[in-house]
Every structure is written in C-alpha cells, then in structure tokens.
Amino acid sequence: MNSNPGPGKTIERGQAGFDEALFDTSFSVDDPGVRPELIVQANDVSDVVAAVERANASDLKVAVVSGGHSWAQNHIRDGGMLIDLSRLNEIQIDAECKTAVVGPAARSGDIDALLAKQKLFFPVAHAYTVGMGGFLLQGGFGWNSRMMGLACQNVTAADVVLADGSLVHASESENADIFWAVRGSGPGFFGIVVRFYLKLHDRPKFTGIKLQVFQLKHLEDVLRWADEVGPTVSPRVEFQMVINRKPLGFFSHGIEVLCPVLADSRKEAKDAVSFIDKSPVRRKASLTLPVIPVSLTSVMRGAEKVVFVEGARWHTDNMWLKSPIDPVLPKLRAMAESQPAPPAHALWMNWNPISRDRPDMAFSLEAQSYLALYGAIKGETINPADETWATDHLRAMEHHGLGSQLGDENLARRATNFLKPDNLARLTSLTAKYDPNGRFYSFGHLK
Ligand SMILES: Cc1cc2nc3c(=O)[nH]c(=O)nc-3n(C[C@H](O)[C@H](O)[C@H](O)COP(=O)(O)OP(=O)(O)OC[C@H]3O[C@@H](n4cnc5c(N)ncnc54)[C@H](O)[C@@H]3O)c2cc1C
C-alpha cells in the first residue's frame, strides 16, 4: 500500500493506472473481480464534498476507503464512485487538553508514536498501518481496550459529509443521532467521516509481553483453561491465543499464548500475568518466557511482519463465542487441523472488559471471548478450501456464537448478526433519513 500518496486526482475505469490506484488502497491483495466506475483521490474535505456532489449529479453510488484494512475489501464494488481518503491523514495533538483530531486515514502506529513522545495514549489498533476510519466506525478493539473501553468510546465528535453533500459536526450534543451511528455502524455508516475528535489518556508506564507455546495436542486443555480463567484475568492484560502451523516461526503446529500487558510498573505487569505461571496446564507448555519489555511500535510493526503480513489474499471471519467452551471444542479441533499454512491463523481472545456499561451507541454486540479466523493465501497456488476455511468453520460452529464483530467481518460470505436487533432497526431508520436515495454502499457484498 502507498503510505505517502501523491496529489489527488480522478481516475476512470479503463484509464492507465486505474488498477494500481485501486489496489493501492487495499491491504488484502485479493482481486474481487469487480471495479468501480471511477476513483476520486480526495486531498481535503472540500474534495470529499465535491465528490459527493458529483456522485449525486451523475447518480453514482459511493464507496469509501480510509486505511484500506477491510479484510473483505468492502470498498471495492461493482460500479459507482470510490472516494479514496488516504490523503486525509492529519494528526493534531493537544497534550494539555488531552485531545486529538485525526483524519480518517491517520494510521494507528503513527498516532501511537506521536502520543508516546508526550506520554499520552489512545487505544489504537494492534497493527501499525490500520486506518482510523474503518477502525473507529466499527467499534475498535484497541490496545488496552479492556481498561479504556472500545476505541469508539474515546471518540467525542466527528465531522461528517452526508449524502446531500452537507458537512456536519456530530457529538453527544449536536446531531446526536449521527454521532450514535458513528460509534459502531462500521461499513454500514450512511455518511463519510472526514475528521474524528479523540479523548486521550495518560500512557501506561510499562509495556511488556508474556509468551507461552503449546503443541496442538493440548488444544482442548489449553482452551478450557483459558475460557475458565478469562473472567479473572486483569484488564491490563490482553490474553490471546494464536493457533497456527508454525508458532513463533519454528515450533510445529500449535498454540502461541500471547499476553501483552500495559501497566504502571514492571512489578504490576508481572503480577498481572502471573496466572500463566500458576495455570494447571503450565507443565504441558513447550516454552514459557518471562515478561519481556517491548514498545508498542515494535509490537505493531512486528505484527505486520510476522502475522498480518502484506501481500496476501485474506479471507477472514469471526464470532463472539459463548461460554463455556466445551461444546465447541470438537469444532475448534477440526478448524485447527484443517488450517492453511501461515500466515493463516486463528485468534482466540479473552474479552471480559473492565466494564460493559457502554454509552448508547450503535456498537452493541459482545461476549466473554472472541474467535477470529484469518485465512491467508500467499503466492499463486490456490486450494479452494483455503479460501473458504474461515467462513466454513465459523458456519459449522455458528450456534455456539452470539454473532460477529464488524472489524473482521465477512458478511458477504456469511451473513450474521453484528448489532443488537434494536440498534440495527435504529441504524436502518437513520440511514433512510440521512441517505434516502441509497447514495452510499452499505454492508457487505458478494464477490
Ligand atoms: C492487519 C490488520 C490488523 C487489524 N487489527 C485490528 C485491531 O487491533 N482491532 C480492531 O478492532 N480491528 C482490527 N483490524 C480490523 C480493522 O479495524 C478494520 O478492517 C477497519 O475497517 C480498518 O479500517 P481502515 O480505515 O484501515 O479500513 P477501510 O478498508 O478503509 O475501511 C473499512 C470500511 O469502513 C468504511 N469506512 C472507512 N472509512 C470511512 C469513513 N471515513 N467514512 C465512512 N465510512 C468509512 C467503508 O465502508 C470501508 O469499506 C485489523 C485489520 C487488519 C488488516
């Protein structure tokens, strides 16, 4: 992906450079086989307004891309106009007021690196290049979100271009219904966010990671333990497990237990992850390391070198998992045994946030733990089963879940619940009010 784009312009289908401009917007290199009619590369907010007015005049549907990390490439549609916001990547920090204003294409890692210099913090996404547009709209499981809430809970306002071309400010006190939708409607949002206003926090003083590795034969024991202990794990710890065919790059098929911990001292971090050293499965581990101090920048960059690598065709899907986990264990084993080669992997995440006392916002579905399957294909060889591994296995275990999360959505291939029914009904009626002619593409499409 182009992280330093040049001046903006309009490129029509068939023109030289059209495909390059299109795929430059997308983290996944999959070619869905469809193309918009034209791409508008906006340089600023007035370009976005002008593009929407042009779409209205020409009766073109509009898709939007910010950081381009939608696994499903939700912005690549058949026909219409694609508005590429990747140049709207401003980051302004007011350290004294602990606030920031960011453009929709500001990248998680860039925001975090600037905040680190001022000992400030925002729950950005876990990989460096994820854009704020899609991340904040869908809710956002950010760093330290078990403590600080979803990233969107830390959004205080947004500037939005609506379907009629008007530019409005939305917050709890102004255009409150638009603000309600900004926080959780994800790719179903009925406008274009051109600026987010963020609330910042003090930066945790210590960041570390605790690692453990198990062979796949211990899958059931490890998952049972994780599901049981999850609710008691400190919210400072992001307790996750990655199942893949090559843990840490050299073990054979197994489970990486990854526990990033953000605390105010090394001692506090060690205490927070001590449940790993006391666990009933600890003696089965092939490797257990002490807490290693790390910078978030290195973890975010590392995630994109090792796990979420560029240059792959990603086919992802996800599910909020019901507890207890026992009934779904046979399905989880079948999923693990058929998983494609790395970088494909499965992620189990202990969610259990410090509080589920959420503000009234579109985001509304969550559970104790989370399962995401990241199917990835590198190179030319295509095994059709690898392409559908994520959706096939999640479909098979659907009745053990509570619906899905919009960040890792694949609604085009597997339709699921992603908001509570009342919230979906409210979003549908707001869409009818603010985008009566269906100018903006909404949730997923079949490729
Ligand atoms: C490597 C990687 C790591 C990830 N890590 C995390 C993580 O830690 N936590 C997490 O919660 N999620 C994570 N995700 C999922 C990610 O948050 C979503 O894919 C999100 O949509 C990405 O935002 P984006 O702006 O980069 O994507 P885009 O593809 O640009 O946006 C996705 C969709 O959102 C809509 N949209 C985007 N911008 C706007 C806008 N300005 N106005 C209106 N609609 C808009 C469009 O429908 C667009 O198709 C990760 C994804 C990847 C690829």
Image (tube, rainbow, N blue to C red):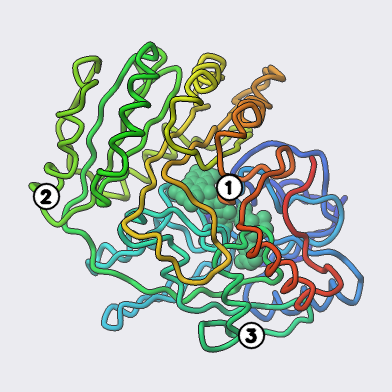
Quarter location, residue 49: bottom right
- Report ligand 1 position as a quadrant: bottom right
Residue kind at label 2, given as amino acid type: Glu
> In percent of the image, x 59 and y 51: which residue is there?
406
| Front disc: 3 or 1 | 3
Query: In the rendered image, which residue does mark 3 sit on?
Result: 168
The crowd level at tag 3 (other Cα within 10 Å; few <14, some 14-19, many 20+) is some
The crowd level at tag 2 (other Cα within 10 Å; few <14, some 14-19, many 20+) is some
Is the Cβ of the residue at disc 3 closer than 8 Å to that at disc 2?
Answer: no
Q: Secondary structure at mark 1?
A: loop
Residue kind at label 1, given as amino acid type: Met
- C-alpha distance separating marks 3 and 2: 44 Å
Query: In the rendered image, which residue does mark 2 sit on?
Result: 268
Residue kind at label 3, given as amino acid type: Val
- C-alpha distance separating marks 3 and 1: 30 Å
Q: Quadrant of the C terminus?
A: top right
Dot placed on the residue nearer the N-terminal end, 3 or 1: 1
Q: Is residue 134 above or below residue 321?
A: below
> Measured from the top left, where is residue 57 in percent x and y?
90, 77
Kindly give the residue lying farthest to the bottom in the view shown. 174
